[in-house]
Image (cartoon, rainbow, N blue to C red):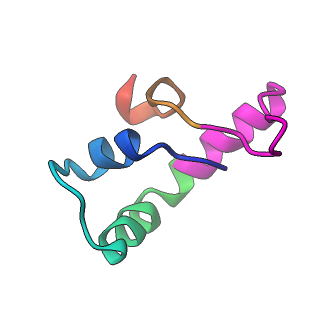
Amino acid sequence: MLVPQDVLYDFGRFRETREDSEYVRMFEERRAAILAAAAVGIDAGRVGADRRVSLMHDDLPEFR
């Protein structure tokens, strides 16, 4: 699974690069939503040649 940096920034309402621990905290707080979005992408066949599913803003309910 790949969550682009701009999506992470928007999740955390970050305006600049943060420490890795802040990205981990943000992911853990939204783990269920991120993993559910990844599952939908996998079910839809959106797994790339690199065997990742890339999540974009439209994939996550928080940004719809």
Task: Please report the residue visible at 35 percent of the width from the left and 40 percent of the height from the top.
Answer: 6
Q: Tally the numbered discs.
A: 0
Residue occupying the far bottom of the picture = 21
Quarter residue 57 falls in? top left
| 29 over 53 or under it: above or below | below
Quarter residue 54 falls in? top right
- Quadrant placement of the C terminus: top left
Task: Please report the residue visible at 54 percent of the width from the left and 48 percent of the height from the top.
Answer: 34
| 7 over 17 or under it: above or below | above
Magenta span contains residue 22: no
| 56 over 2 or under it: above or below | above
Residue 43 in the image: x percent, y percent? Answer: 82, 32
- Magenta segment: 34-54
Residue 11 in the image: x percent, y percent? Answer: 32, 47
Task: Please report the residue visible at 30 percent of the width from the left and 70 percent of the height from the top.
Answer: 22
Quarter residue 17 falls in? bottom left
Magenta span contains residue 35: yes
Relative side of 38 to 48, left or right: left
Relative side of 18 to 44, left or right: left
In the foreground, 33 or 24 = 24
Task: Please report the residue visible at 28 percent of the width from the left and 73 percent of the height from the top.
Answer: 19
Residue 21 in the image: x percent, y percent? Answer: 35, 77
Relative side of 12 to 3, left or right: left
Residue 28 in the image: x percent, y percent? Answer: 45, 67
